[in-house]
Amino acid sequence: MTSLFPQPVTPQIQPTRIGAHDRPRYDHYINGAFTVPSSGVYFDTSDPVSGEVWAEVARGTASDVDAACRAAADAFENPAWRGISASARGHMMRRLGDLIAENADWLAAVEMKDNGKLISELQMQMRYMANYYYYYGGLADKIQGDTIPSDKPGVFNFTRYEPLGVVACIMPWNSPLPLTSLKLAPALAAGNTVVLKPSEFTSASLLEFVKLVELAGFPKGVVNVVTGFGNEMGEALVSHPLVERIAFTGGPQAGRIINEQAARSMKRVTMELGGKSPNIIFEDADLEQAVKGAVAGIFAASGQTCVAGSRLLLQRSIHDDFLARLDDFLKDIKFGHPSDPATQIAPISTAPQMAKIEEYVQIALGEGARLVRGGKRARVAGYPNGLFYEPTIFADVTNDMRIAQEEVFGPVLSVIPFEDEDDAVRIANDVDFGLAAGVWTQNLARGIRMTERVRAGTIWVNNYRSTSTTSPFGGFKMSGTGREGGIAGMMEYLELKSVWISTGVEIPNPFIRR
């Protein structure tokens, strides 16, 4: 079979099995081996650029989930993992980081084939992704407990952090490998074992990536991957008695269901559930830079990003001028194949997501929003079945409209005017979400005040979409719970234990608590 994407640099990586119609066939990865699904059934995955099926993926069931969870639980107790030092875990993770860096272009090409994201952004993301494993590998042996100055005589009290056990990570389709690494890297550094469940739309890149995990020397069963549909295996994974924590990135509706299921057995959850983020432009902002920030906030990645600045709040004095500048900036935007470095707008990743975008555009028109630009599919030469959608701008939007309150997850921008700082804060916070926000002003005092008053987990001032593995990321309100990234992200995967050691000779009165 002719390769669909560049081959890995690392020669020991085993080739993917070939299935029907000369397509790659991806199996589960359980207990250190690629494993056919218990049902024997596979489903098709399509290229969003051509619309053509390009690979087959294992369709998992509760039986496959059980096998993966048991493998992870056995690995957690195995001295090959449980018995090694934190420093040894860190060394293993840094080796994985090296392998990612060596094979970044290969991983980017696979992810592009699966979700249609720009190769230029993916290559950058894959190279940076190595830093997740360097950073958390370095943290692995630096998580320390405390010595507690107890007020009880004759005892020595200290705390220690320990791994939880088996962690289940469920990823979305828009950035499969980076979002996997935000969960996997700290979970492994803390000493846990992991079962990964990618989106049914984008499973291939994770099943290629896991080959690097194997080469890095992780013992079998430490990392497992099961694939399939959430409605067929999601509950089995979330409710499995061997799973201690659920880490989920996705939509709020699925998040609610997972949270409810996890609560039945008191499982811990970390959830990032999207947003309806305000990008706030004050009249004193550098408007040229703010236009770029508005574009980056909503049209980068075709709007398929959880932090999308999908509500553009413009101070009324600059509203018309800024809207004209933004419209002019977009007039020569380039659609094309995501492998072309000149392409600026890549396709929507999935057909259901395209349908959702089209539905919300009609909702906006029905609510009375004024269409300034876009509002329809883009026709791209050479790709008649490609899932391309034009950058879309709605003006005359009020914050109570559905288009301003509900996450579209596409290149659709709602423009809302505001009068002053208090009005901007009121509009920004008047939504169920609180994941991110942007503030554009040359007034430093105002910028700081806005970071205090806007209720969001990440706030950018005079920039948008900057991220780092060293910084915590997560949301307020319906945008989720817990944090990923930074030291805070590591602590989500650790259990705190308090230890009391008697230093006295005499046993105190057993009928009285000390």
Image (spheres, helix red, strand yellow):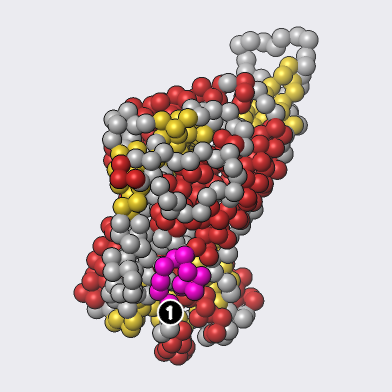
- Region rendered in magenta: 334-344
How many residues crowd mark 1 within 10 Å: few (<14), some (14–19), many (20+)? few
Res 266 → quadrant = top left
- Residue 479 belongs to the span the image colors magenta: no
Q: Secondary structure at mark 1?
A: loop
Q: Is residue 480 above or below residue 219?
A: below
Q: Residue at x 45, y 51 (%)?
A: 3
Extreme left residue here?
Answer: 366
Q: Residue at x 34, y 81 (%)?
A: 373
Position in image of residue 415 (x %, y %): 38, 78
Q: Residue at x 42, y 56 (%)?
A: 113
Q: Nearer the viewer, residue 461 or 100?
A: 100
Image quadrant occupied by the C terminus: top right
Res 127 → quadrant = bottom right
Residue 272 appearing in the image: no
Position in image of residue 77 (x %, y %): 56, 21
Extreme front residue here?
Answer: 1
Position in image of residue 130 (x %, y %): 62, 50
Residue 482 relative to residue 50: left or right: right
Position in image of residue 198 (x %, y %): 41, 44
Residue 388 relative to residue 31: left or right: left
Q: Nearer the viewer, residue 184 or 29?
A: 29
Residue tagged 1: 333
Residue 363 appearing in the image: yes
What predominant SS class does the magenta segment belong to? loop
Residue type at mark 1?
A: Ile
